[in-house]
Image: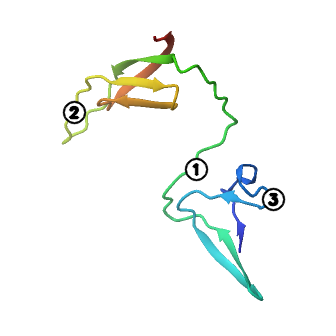
């Protein structure tokens, strides 16, 4: 059994198959320091404390609030159009400038996945969403 002292853990007991257990979700690459070990018969308790790594591998995503998810019938689709324009940037010596030809984007309501393809260095993107019923 582990006893954890950490700030980045998220309580998942409401989503667990065992709601009476104190279960938490830890971010990958979270580092701990062993503070102590206790032995009581066949039970071993390891006390761990979260440490701040000298070179963080991952940064936690800030939790602002809950997001609402709206479901639409399968026949509904969202079409997103993007206005892409080049930004003026400083020229870097000994580096080639890459030309931006544009990008394509789509949104799938079924999966909730947004994808953008194309070369986009030094671009400014503004988006507008148009609802459309496709049959």
Depth check, front residue: 95 or 120: 120
> Disc 3 or 1, which lies upstream in sequence?
3
Find the residue positioned furthest to the bottom.
Answer: 41
Q: Quadrant of the N terminus?
A: bottom right
Q: Residue at x 59, y 64 (%)?
A: 52
Q: Residue at x 72, y 53 (%)?
A: 11
Q: Residue at x 51, y 65 (%)?
A: 54
How far apart, in angstroms, are the residues tagged by discs 3 and 2? 58 Å
Helix, strand or loop under label 2: loop
Q: Which residue is mark 2?
A: 97
Residue 79 point in image, percent of width and height? 45, 16
Quarter occupied by residue 51: bottom right
Depth check, front residue: 55 or 74: 74
Q: Is residue 72 above or below residue 17?
A: above
Q: What mark, if any, has residue 60 been given in the picture? A: 1
Q: How packed is label 1: few (under 14 Cα within 10 Å), some, or many (20 or more)?
A: few
Residue 85 point in image, percent of width and height? 34, 19
Q: Which residue is mark 3?
A: 20
Q: How is the image coloured?
A: rainbow
- Which one is in front in this view, the residue at disc 3 or the one at disc 2? 3
Q: Is residue 131 above or below residue 117?
A: above
How far apart, in angstroms, are the residues tagged by discs 3 and 1? 27 Å
Quarter occupied by residue 41: bottom right
> Disc 3 or 2, which lies upstream in sequence?
3
> Disc 2 or 1, which lies upstream in sequence?
1
Residue 78 point in image, percent of width and height? 49, 18
Depth check, front residue: 58 or 26: 26
Helix, strand or loop under label 1: loop
Quarter occupied by residue 63: top right
Q: How packed is label 3: few (under 14 Cα within 10 Å), some, or many (20 or more)?
A: few
Q: How packed is label 2: few (under 14 Cα within 10 Å), some, or many (20 or more)?
A: few
């Amino acid at each position: 059994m582990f006893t954890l002292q950490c700030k980045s853990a998220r309580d998942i007991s409401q989503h667990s198959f065992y709601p009476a257990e104190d279960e938490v979700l830890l971010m990958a690459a979270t580092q701990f320091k062993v503070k102590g070990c206790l032995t009581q018969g066949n039970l071993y308790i390891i006390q761990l404390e979260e440490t701040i790594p000298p070179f963080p591998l991952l940064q936690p995503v800030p939790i602002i609030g809950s997001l609402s998810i709206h479901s639409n019938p399968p026949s509904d689709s969202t079409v997103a159009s993007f206005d892409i324009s080049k930004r003026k940037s400083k020229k870097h010596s000994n580096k080639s400038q890459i030309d931006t030809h544009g990008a394509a984007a789509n949104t799938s309501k079924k999966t909730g996945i947004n994808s953008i393809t194309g070369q986009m260095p030094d671009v400014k993107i503004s988006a507008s969403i148009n609802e459309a019923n496709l049959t």
